[in-house]
Image (tube, rainbow, N blue to C red):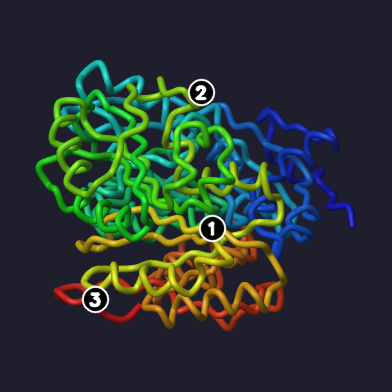
């Protein structure tokens, strides 16, 4: 059914809009259809009714007010690189393109503040002359916006050192606008930033983001091969815990996964079943090489960042990008997501490797998580239906992983974000008419459009606890 846009457009005034059906359909997509066969059909069916293109913060306030007064659903959009359905308008409405709000507002020492639509690469380009860069970024750094990363992301390149986005200190401040008849501008800091982080843009319009920075090393990209996968995995743990070696990326791949990444194939070894992708600070190359030698590995690529022979930054073969490259070779390959935490991560991953080695390629990303060393496990295997996905997730949980569901549109059912009463109250306060990315953030039982795939969820330590506790 066509939605009557007349009242909403009248309330917008001169805020630019786009209504071309071809553009609407194209911009109502993110990477979900490529990453999840469970969500694919649903992702392709939903289309926004109008695209709104705010030019500045005053326009954003007008959009929020117009939506509240006319009850128009809103979905905030940056670059559209998300793959959990964050950017799919389940209820149509107005897709709000925030990319014109792209200024880096200031850099002060080790802190940067930028508008929502600033691209991650542009932020690094602005901060690097002063010797700083973002602590972490998605594998889509060249396209992704800072608000999109904070609102829909979780971890990324740099997480092997700095942890995940929700870890204290990794997001310093957010400015968000409420969707009310008279919108409010709210400043969030401390733990409150996590009310909006990974909420899929469903409880406030992010207009500004304040992030900590890290020393901008000259990074060297390394590909290292090992005869055995478990040797590569043990090496990754030794590198991750070598605190004297600054590092930005530690990815572990098995030979089966490697065989799907065509651009990297010339730089591996068919006889080796363990492959490491690493980014290490240049002054520490000798220390890194010594560690490789100690584990019996061999470095096949040593290149400056983004200057490797595979024609892209090495991090674009890690995290979610690894799956993207794999699908170019094998379109039916999918992943599930498990979190393996120390102590015991190595033993748990060994169980998953032994269980799945003949049917799935291994892919583990090292990350710090809530103060612990951890691995994000994303095995690649041929899709055989939802029950098969559920069986793989259940097996990973039995092996010792905390399992998330990367095949649902719903924040809660995804399992990466713990939700409680404070989150529900914040949602009601910032979006009292339930207009923002409607259908994604729910606090009751799972809705009928969420796939029936169980998830254990990811558990974080309660405040004041030194042990991993409940969700």
The image quadrant that residue 351 belongs to is bottom left
Under tag 2, what secondary structure?
A: loop
* CA distance for labels 3 and 1: 28 Å
User: In front: mark 1 or mark 2?
Assistant: 2
Q: Taking 294 as reference, is 231 left or right?
A: right
Answer above or below: position of 256 versus 214. Answer: below
Q: Which residue is mark 2?
A: 311
Q: Which residue is mark 3?
A: 468
User: In front: mark 2 or mark 3?
Assistant: 2
Residue at position x 81%, y 35% from top? 19
Mark 3 Cα-neighbour bin, 10 Å: few <14, some 14–19, many ≥20: some
Answer above or below: position of 390 versus 306. Answer: below
Circles 2 and 3 in contact, beta carbons < 8 Å: no
Give the residue at the far front of this rendering.
Answer: 271
Q: Taking 140 as reference, is 157 left or right?
A: left
Q: Which residue is mark 1?
A: 202
> Is residue 207 visible from the viewing direction of this image?
no
Could you say where residue 405 lies in the image, as x and y percent from the top left?
Answer: 54, 69
């Amino acid at each position: 059914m066509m939605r009557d846009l007349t009242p909403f457009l009248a309330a917008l005034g001169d805020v630019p809009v786009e209504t071309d059906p071809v553009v609407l359909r194209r911009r109502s997509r993110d990477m979900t259809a490529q990453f999840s066969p469970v969500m694919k059909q649903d992702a392709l069916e939903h289309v926004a009714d109008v695209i709104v293109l705010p030019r500045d913060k005053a326009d954003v306030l007008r959009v929020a007010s117009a939506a509240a007064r006319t009850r128009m659903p809103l979905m905030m959009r940056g670059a559209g690189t998300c793959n959990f359905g964050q950017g799919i308008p389940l209820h149509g409405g107005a897709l709000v393109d925030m990319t014109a709000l792209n200024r880096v507002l200031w850099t002060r020492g080790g802190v940067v503040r930028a508008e929502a639509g600033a691209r991650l690469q542009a932020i690094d380009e602005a901060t690097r002359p002063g010797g700083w860069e973002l602590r972490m970024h998605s594998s889509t750094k060249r396209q992704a916006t800072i608000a999109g990363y904070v609102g829909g992301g979780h971890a990324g390149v740099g997480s092997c050192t700095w942890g995940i986005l929700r870890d204290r200190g990794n997001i310093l401040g957010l400015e968000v606008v409420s969707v009310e008849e008279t919108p409010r501008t709210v400043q969030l800091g401390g733990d409150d930033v996590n009310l909006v982080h990974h909420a899929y843009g469903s409880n406030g319009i992010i207009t500004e983001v304040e992030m900590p920075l890290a020393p901008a090393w000259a990074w060297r990209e390394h590909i290292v091969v090992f005869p055995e996968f478990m040797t590569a995995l043990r090496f990754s743990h030794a590198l991750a815990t070598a605190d004297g070696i600054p590092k930005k990326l530690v990815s572990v791949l098995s030979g089966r996964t490697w065989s799907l990444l065509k651009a990297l194939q010339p730089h591996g070894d068919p006889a080796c079943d363990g492959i490491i992708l690493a980014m290490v600070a240049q002054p520490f190359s000798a220390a890194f090489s010594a560690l490789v030698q100690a584990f019996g590995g061999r470095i096949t690529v040593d290149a400056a960042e983004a200057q490797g022979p595979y024609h892209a930054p090495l991090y674009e073969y890690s995290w979610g990008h690894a799956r993207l490259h794999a699908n170019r070779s094998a379109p039916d390959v999918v992943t599930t997501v498990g979190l393996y935490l120390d102590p015991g991560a190595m033993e748990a991953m060994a169980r998953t490797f032994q269980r799945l080695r003949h049917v799935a390629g291994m892919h583990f990303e090292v990350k710090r998580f809530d103060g612990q060393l951890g691995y994000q496990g994303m095995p690649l295997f041929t899709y055989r239906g939802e029950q098969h996905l559920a069986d793989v997730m259940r097996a990973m949980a039995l092996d010792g992983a905390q399992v998330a569901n990367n095949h649902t549109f719903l924040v809660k059912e995804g399992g990466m974000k713990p939700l409680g009463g404070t989150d529900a109250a914040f949602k009601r306060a910032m979006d009292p008419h339930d207009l923002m990315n409607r259908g994604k953030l729910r606090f009751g039982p799972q809705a009928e459009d969420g796939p029936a795939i169980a998830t254990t969820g990811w558990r974080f330590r309660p405040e004041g606890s030194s042990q991993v506790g409940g969700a």
